[in-house]
Image (tube, rainbow, N blue to C red):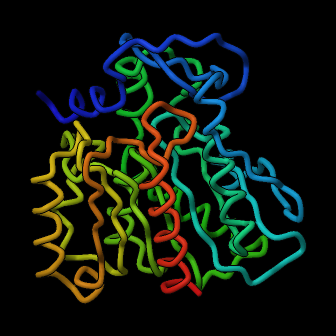
Amino acid sequence: MTAVEQEINSLTPPNPLLLPKSRRGFLQAGALAGFAASVAPTGALQAQTITTSAEGLDHGMVQMGASNDQFPGYFAKPKGKKGLATVIVLHEIFGVHEHIKDVCRRFAQKGFMAVAPECFHRQGDPSKYTSIPDLFANIVSKASDKQVLGDVRAAMAWAASNGGDKNKAGVTGFCWGGRIVWLAAAEIKEMKGGVAWYGRIRTTVNEANPIHPIDIAEKLQWPVLGLYGGADSGIPNSDVDEMKTLLSFGSKPSQASEIILYPDTPHAFHADYRPSYRKNPAEDGWKRCLAWFEKTLV
């Protein structure tokens, strides 16, 4: 089984879960054939989905990047504040949808500026896809690491010009975005810390994605907190263990990094809009995430 097939399996529930569709703008659930990117939460999913107030915040969609290559993103920050520690929030394979925006508001309510760049802006709209394999083939696989890291830098620059402190910048990411966090730790020296939520440690190597995060584990320029599920079908525990070992022999930031493995916990355990959500690991991970950024950025 290839790395991509493992990731698809980890994102696809073992039993069909069919929910009525409405235009909510983000993924809620899916069937074995794939996911629909615009279904509304009902029943238990609706009860567990977190909605964070925007009261007291400046927030919304904006354009960022160079004048000849602008792209959209979402930001949230305490209203009228400047000089804020900044967290770049990297989305899953589904793009910047309502859950990612809500995560930004959660950071902002804790005093951070949060910016979520839409890293698939050149490839297309993930919400138009109802099949994960098609989404991988047509969108995800075409977003190169070089392009995405450039988007992260552009998001940092936008934040620094709009209330963020360029000397207090970090990054967090979920699933696909979690992998990018590890790469950024080796490539973007201007940042101070990162939190990778169940980001793949090994993946399919190709022209767009030429290295594994595990290949640069010993070369980090700032510390990363990794949050992983012990029952993630797409990320073997052996990969997590190997990553821990390599970090321990690496640079000072690599050695200062930490990985938490939650037993019996699946992929996407923080995604409260999906059946994979696990309340206890998600809440513990969020507390650790905030503490990590308080330590490394503030």
Asked if 121 appears above or below 187 in the picture, the reply is above
Picture residue at 24% right of the left edge, 31% below the top: 4
Considering depth in this image, is 33 or 67 the residue closer to the camera?
33
Q: Position of residue 6 (x, y in %)?
A: 21, 32
Q: Residue at coordinates 51% horizontally, 78% vertically from top-left? A: 291
Q: Is residue 219 positioned above or below 286 on the image?
A: below
For the N terminus, the image quarter is top left
Return the residue nearer the eye: 166 or 27.
27
| Image spot of residue 76 (x, y percent) | 75, 60
Q: Position of residue 126 (x, y in %)?
A: 54, 27
Hey, which quadrant is residue 273 in on the image?
top right
Residue in the image at 33% along x and 51% along y: 199
Residue 48 makes an appearance in the image: yes
What percent of the width, then of the height, locates residue 263? Answer: 25, 53
Q: Which residue sits at x=59%, y=68%? A: 87
Tally the numbered discs.
0
Report whether residue 66 is seen.
Answer: no
> In the picture provided, is 3 more to the left or to the right than 13?
left
